[in-house]
Amino acid sequence: MPKQQRFKTGYPGVYYIVGKTPGTEKPDKIYYIYYRKSGKIVEEKAGRQFKDDMTPARASLIRAERIRGAKPSNKEQRETERQKKTEKINRWTIDKLWGEYLNNNPSLKGKATDINRYDLHIKQPFGDKEPKDIAPLDVDGLRLKLLKIRKPGTVRNVMELLRRIMNFGVKKHLCSALNFTIEMPQANNLRTEDLSPEQLAKLLEAIEGEENIQAANFMKIVLFTGMRRGELFRLQWSDIDFDRGFICIRDPKGGIDQTIPLNDEARNLLINHEKQNSLYVFPGRKGKQRTDIKKQVNKIKDKAGLPKEFRALHGLRHLFASMLASSGQVDMYTLQKLLTHKSAAMTQRYAHLRDETMRQASNLAGGIIGDAIKKEEKG
């Protein structure tokens, strides 16, 4: 391509070439400036006559600013923009850490719930920030704001998710650790639920009369084994060892696969439970893993006339634990293993039931001995 002719102007260091207005054939002057900076000649475009309303005088002013260093050259501006874009790409914001966290944990338990918590509560205030840009007051502000509209347990889960994301970033050397501790609200989730003998009888009657065998047997298995809802959703026929009498619980809440005894009641139920064309004992649609059964079990709960606050499945798990603890025949360590609690602290909520049984046994022993002493004194 031949070099275009340069036309001088009445201003030093300013010239123009004749081009065409973009989209038309109309001639257009394109002004350039040149000057010396750090011993080197810099030559750059100042602008177009029509598009940028450029004149020799304006081009001369731009040249003067460049020489004084008041404004960077076009090349320097492009380099600055390129650096900003690179920094933006390389910034490990909370949004970016969250995306990477999900990619690294494809089988994350409670994934849908975590995504909902992130989108509702974390993304807006922190999504575009890097961990180093988050101040203690920022986190405190979110916690206090949520405590006005949410239960402490929910707020704790949100704070724990934020901490989990940041810890992931630190572990993967993507960001630096916070220089403060995220304060967790105290949530009293140690709620135990119980049913009176009459309520339990009504529930068993409602279960026996339920036409949805999947839902009925699901509730029975919780009563017989104390297994969690999610554990039963994941339960496959291959996890049940009928010969040795064990159920293998895959990926429990505690994190490590565990086994629990297959008691006689659970064995009889599972042997007679209808096997569908699925790997799962309680499959969902098209034989895939079930993700919900709330509607079906709540129907049974309502039919039995149980209190509204009684949780149809988790309440039965508590009932299983309460009956064992109050029997006086099961120690806390054994109960912890049956419930697959990660720590003994979770099982301690049932300790008072065992204490009461022991107190009654102690009173009984005291009464027997007291009667014996009275008889001896009379004799």
Image (cartoon, rainbow, N blue to C red):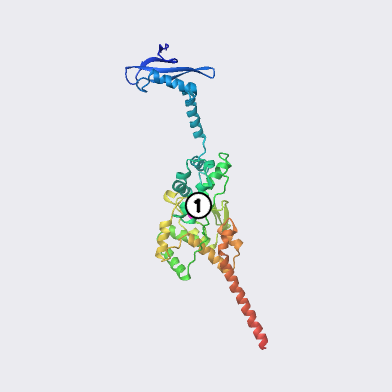
- Image spot of residue 338 (x, y percent): 57, 59
Q: Main secondary structure of the magenta part?
A: helix
Give the quadrant of residue 169: top right
Residue 258 rendering spot, x and y as whole percentages: 58, 54
Q: Please report the residue visible at 45 percent of the width from the left and 70 percent of the height from the top.
A: 198
The residue nearer to you, when weighing 99 against 361, is 99
Of 124 and 117, the residue lying toward us: 124
Q: Is residue 318 above or below residue 358?
A: above
Q: Nearer the viewer, residue 169 or 114?
A: 169
Residue 163, given in percent of the width and then of the height, sits at 54, 47
Horizontal side of residue 142 vs 352, given as left or right: left
- Identify the image quadrant of the C terminus: bottom right
Dot 1 corresponds to which residue?
A: 157
* Of residues 32 and 360, the one drawn nearer to the viewer in this rendering: 32
Q: Is residue 41 left or right of residue 6?
A: right
The residue segment tinted magenta is 153-159
Q: Which residue type does callout 1 highlight?
A: Asn
Q: Residues within 10 Å of mark 1 (few under 14, many from 20)?
A: some
